[in-house]
Every structure is written in structure tokens, then in C-alpha cells.
Amino acid sequence: MYWEQEVEKIGQAKLKKMQLAALQKTIRRAQKSFYYEKLFKDNKLNAKIVKSVSDIQKFPFTIKDDLREHWPYGFVAVPKEKLVRMHSSSGTTGRATVVFHTLRDIAVWTNLLARCMYMVGMRQRDVFQNMMTYGLFTGGLGFHYGAEKIGALIIPAGAGNSKRQIQLMRDFETTVVHVIPSYALHLSTVFAELKLDPRRDTKVRIAFLGAEPHTEKMRKKIEEIYGYKAFNSYGLSEMNGPGVAFECPEQNGMHIWEDSFLVEIVDPKTLQPVADGEEGELVLTSLQREGMPLIRYRTKDLTRIIPGRCPCGRTHRRIERIKGRTDDMLILKGVNIYPMQVEKKLMEIEGVGTNFLIILEREGFNDDMMVKVEVDKKYFSGDMKQLEGLRRKIVEELKSEILITPKVNLVEPDSIPKGEGKAVRVVDNRKD
Ligand code: ADP
Ligand code: ZN
């Protein structure tokens, strides 16, 4: 039994037809907003020029700064009284942006999340603990509504308060959790502190990991510590929030729901479409939204379409795990580095703990990278040679991946501050 078998397995021809109709509708809707009305007029654009979905390429991109500059209501496309909810982005890369929803928008979003959760096995009998911030952030209420639609019992725990999370998990026999990956690792140190083993002392069987980039190694590590299956959940507030793309039971790429989002991958420099299978920036057009439709929104997230069909039978294309944001990229001594490259290597090394931080420094004209890495407690208890050995190994491994030699500083578990939200991976002290 499937939640929405019909739409999840929709044939290509039918999907294209549905997308075209939805796109034309979206353009007509968008035209009613202050921002797009002017943009379309200035560029002589309208719904009539959309004869196939690829005609989307005739429209300009929308970027985060456009949203910021038209704060607060410049993108709203319905009379204000039709709006029932606003959410905002986390503000990871600057001033947060806001998104508005009608009642129908909320219903469509809820459905997408129920589809995601059902896909990986969550059912009415499950107890779902949502460890994401409730409020303006989309991860709380978004998943909450989806889980309610499935009929699960929801524990709206919210983020943080680790000891209480663990107690709730144990007392109410939580079976499904939604958690930020860096927080899942942090929480495992609290389990250890309490002398509990999550594999033995909890009943969680499924986790949704979302909101921040993480590597396959990180997923494996989390799965191993907890003994559950962890599924990657991708979304952004500008496209509702979670429920944009989600891993299926195959755990090999995330199905991006093409009935709700029109997908393009472009070269972030030239902004030209890249060939299928090649990496680039994900660009999305909302296909269902009434309150605040967005056209060709540049997510700044780097990924690629995974070619071929998924063995699960769903026809919506898959995107690869997000490699990072275009603006995450560090340039050091002329080399481009993504924080995820550092994470990938670190997670492979025995003895490395649950958190790390990249610190960039400038001395004179020289830029340096220091990586602070939490390692197992045992390295600090006796022989310092062992610690030095591990440090050297980490330097070598990182060098092989990022091609420059970083300074590495090993620290005890839990000594790098960890908030309850998205992990901070880089501190740049180079700006004077
Ligand atoms: P902000 O852009 O301020 O962080 P959002 O809360 O809307 O605000 O977060 C959306 C962003 O979070 C995405 O554009 C992406 O960079 C990141 N993100 C969300 N889910 C994932 C995921 N599963 N993997 C990698 N990155 C993710
Ligand atoms: Zn699949």
C-alpha cells in the first residue's frame, strides 16, 4: 500500500503535461505580485509564451537578494487576507527571508511531507519525536503537519534540551525522529554521559536527517551509533521547507517531487543548464504555490541529477546529496575547498569524535587553515604519543583531500560549542 502511488509513479508524458499546466498557472499567479508584475512587464513576459516546460528558460532567475529587497510583502501574489501562515529561512547566510502560505499551500506542503515519511515506512502506529525548532523555522511545523496527516502520535519536542529529549524518547518509546545530523551526533555524547546506549535503550527505527549538508560517512556513523535507518531530507524555506526532495528506502539519492517543483541544474558561473548527471546549482520553480510563487529560484545548493531509474519504481528524478552551498566554498592559497570535503575525510578516521570546526586565519600575507577536531576521550588519558600519532594521520588524510596542509588541533569531546540549530563549520578570522 502506498501513500500516493499514482503521483509517485507518474509516467513521463503525464508528468510533463501536468507540469506545463501548473507552470502556466504559476506564471499567471506570480504576475499578481508586486515584484513579478514589474519584472514581467519590463521583459515582456507572460504565461502565453510558455508552450513547453523548457520555456521556463525565457524567464530571469530569482535570487535571495530579490526576496530581501522586496521585504516584506513584495512577492505575495494573493490578497493578504488569503494568507494563513508565514515562515522564514534560518538566516544562515545573511538576513532571513520570509515566505507566505495560503491554506491550500499548507495542505499541499503537508501532503508532500506525508508522502516523504510514508515512503520510508512511517505509519499511524509510530511515535514521532520532532527535534526541530518550532516557530518560524520550517522544520518544526512542516514535519508536524505531515506526521499528523499520517496519523502518528507526535511528540513536538522542539530543539535542544538533550536530557529531556532522551527521556521523552525512552518514556514514550519513540520510533521515529527528525533531527539535524550534527545534533544527532551531539546527542549521542549525552547518551554516553548518561551511560545509555541508544541501540539498546531506545526503540527508534527511523530518522529523518535534514536542514544541513552532511556526508554519507556522517549518515553511516549516525546509523551505527543509533541502530536506526537515517534518511536524507532536503528542503528550503523558499520552496516551503522540508519535503522538496527525500530519500526513498534505496538510500541512493533523493527523489525531488517534480509535481510540485520544476527542476533545473545550472552552472553557477555561466548560469547555463548543465548536461544531465553533471554537477551544478539547483534552480527551482514552485508549481503549486498560490501565496508566494517563485520562479527560477537559485538555491545556491550544489548537486546533480542521478541518471537512470530508481529501483523503487518512483519516477521523480533523484538528486545527489547536497555537496554544499556555492557560498560555502573557501578559497585558500588558490585552492577551492568545501567544508564537506573535510567532514568526509574526518568521518573515515578511527578515533575522530562528533564535531569539528574549520578556522581560517591570516598572518601577514599568509592564509592558514586550522581544523579543530574532537577525538575520543581515551586519547587524552595516557600516552601523548598516541594523540600525536592521530594528529599526524589527520593532517595527512586532510592534505590528500584538500591539497593543502592544514594545522590540526585535537580537542576533547564536547569542547567545540554546539548550538541546537545548524552546525557552524567555518569561522573566518581573515577579515581584519
Ligand atoms: P537558510 O538558507 O538561511 O539556512 P533554510 O532554513 O531555508 O534557511 O535552509 C535551507 C538550506 O539548508 C538549503 O538551501 C540547504 O543549503 C540546507 N539544507 C537543507 N536540507 C539539507 C540537506 N538534507 N542536505 C544539505 N543541505 C540541506
Ligand atoms: Zn527510489
Image (cartoon, rainbow, N blue to C red):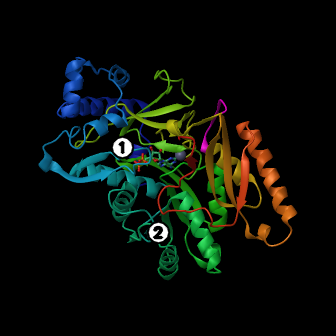
Rendering coords of residue 315 (x, y %): 48, 39
Residue type beneath disc 1: Met
Q: State the residue in front, 105 or 359.
A: 359
* Residue 288's disc number: none
Asked if one can make out residue 275 in the rendered structure from this viewpoint, the answer is yes
Rendering coords of residue 334 (x, y %): 65, 29
Q: Residues within 10 Å of mark 1 (few under 14, many from 20)?
A: many
Name the element at disc 1. helix
Residue 276 appears left or right of 135: right
Rendering coords of residue 191 (x, y %): 61, 75
Rendered image quadrant of residue 137: bottom left
Rendered image quadrant of residue 260: top left
Residue type beneath disc 2: Gly
Q: Residue at x 44, y 48 (%)?
A: 92
Confirm if mark 1 falls within 8 A of ligand 1.
no
Which comes sooner in the sequence, label 1 or label 2? 2
Q: Is residue 40 magenta?
A: no
**Relative vertical location of residue 335 with respect to residue 148 in this rendering, above or below:** above
Name the element at disc 2. loop
Q: State the residue in front, 13 or 152.
A: 152
**Relative vertical location of residue 292 with respect to residue 198 in this rendering, above or below:** above
In the rendered image, the residue lying farthest to the bottom is 171
Q: Is residue 336 magenta?
A: yes
Spatial CA span between label 1 and label 2: 25 Å
Q: Badge 2 is on which residue?
A: 160
Image quarter (top left, top right, bottom left or bottom right) of the N terminus:
bottom left
Q: Residue at x 52, y 77 (%)?
A: 163
Give the magenta-colored segment's residue range.
Answer: 333-339
**Relative vertical location of residue 395 with respect to residue 14 in this rendering, above or below:** below
